[in-house]
Each structure stands twice: as structure tokens, then as C-alpha cells.
Image: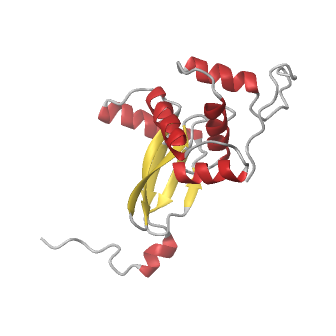
Amino acid sequence: METAELKDPDDDLDNPDNADLTAAAVCAFLRSKGLNVTKTRLHVLALLSEFDRPVSGETLFRHIIKKRESMSKATIYRTLVEFEKAGVVSRQWVAGLTGARAAYVSLQKPRGETFHQIVCRDCERRHALADDGVLERIRQALREEAALGSRPQPLTIYYLCTGCAGRNPLVGMEAPN
């Protein structure tokens, strides 16, 4: 997996065919969130935008090391915490071998869409949700029922896939009274 290339701000910014994040767009995005633009923030944001799933700080650290960049793990985690406070990323808890661990997902993908997914509880198979009509109905119901705000947030729905449901004999059984 390669890091999304950040282009020079003087490059062709008006080209609609340019799907890559431009340096100017990333800088403007960070500033709009009240964050100063730093090399660390640019690298972390570029890496996060590549993943279509929540990613741990450890995974980001390994990818940065592979690129021979000099950045400590603590710096990456501090950046992720700053991003979470500013609304750039969302922290989710994912199951691991030693218990739940924090994983982060960018709230805005390069083209402005918010990340949504469904995840199997057993095998952790993930599928991106792309149907805007269904998502909008879910968001509307959440706003009405739970008095949630309208700011875009990532939506993760947990389920049991058919493969795992077939292997689990307890699926569909009612709890004893």
C-alpha cells in the first residue's frame, strides 16, 4: 500500500480529473479544523485516507517506518488524538487477540464522502456502505430517535455474516428466562 501522493499546491488545482489529494486541499482542510499544518499531520492524514477500514496507530507507524520516515509512535498517537478532538477522525474499538484496541478512520475521504461500513462480529469481514438513500434514512432515524446532531459521522453496523452464522449453533436461539 502506498501513501497518497501530496502534490505541490501550484500544480493544476482546477483539474476535475485529479483524484489525488492536493497539498493545498489538505492544508485547507486541516486549517478549517483549527489545526496547524505540519509534516506529521500531512503524513498521518495521507495514510488514513488510503485505508477503507479503521486502522490502528501501530499500523500507521509500521507504514511510516516502511517509507523510512522519521516519526515516533507517540507522535502518531498524539496526532490521532488531536485529529479526533478536531473531528478529522473517529476512534472505534475493534476486537484484537488481547482485547479491544483503538482504531481510527478518517471522517472525510479524498472526495468528501464519509466512511460507512458493516462488519461481521465473528470474522470481522468488512463491507463498505455506499447506498446514500439507505444511509440517509438511517441518519434521519438516528437524529429523530436519539437526538443526534447532523454532523457527518462514520457509521458502523455490526452483524453476523452468513458464513459465521452457519458455523455458530447458538444463532437464533433465545436467551433463557
20 left or right of 58?
right
Residue at 54%, 21% (x, y): give it. 33
Residue at 69%, 33% (x, y): give it. 111
Q: Position of residue 46 (x, y in %)?
A: 67, 38
Q: Is residue 29 visible?
A: yes
Quadrant that contains the N terminus: bottom right
Query: Which is nearer the eye, 10 or 119?
Result: 10
Q: Position of residue 8 (x, y in %)?
A: 82, 25
Query: Which is nearer the eye, 46 or 65?
Result: 65
Residue at 56%, 42% (x, y): give it. 115
Query: Which is nearer the eye, 44 or 145?
Result: 44
Taking 151 as reference, is 32 above or below it? above
Residue at 60%, 23% (x, y): give it. 30
87 left or right of 66?
left
Taking 172 as reference, is 78 above or below it? above
Q: Is residue 134 visible?
A: no
Image quadrant assignment for residue 99: bottom left
Taking 137 as reference, is 172 above or below it? below
Image quadrant assignment for residue 20: top right
Q: Position of residue 171 (x, y in %)?
A: 35, 74
Q: Position of residue 143 (x, y in %)?
A: 37, 31
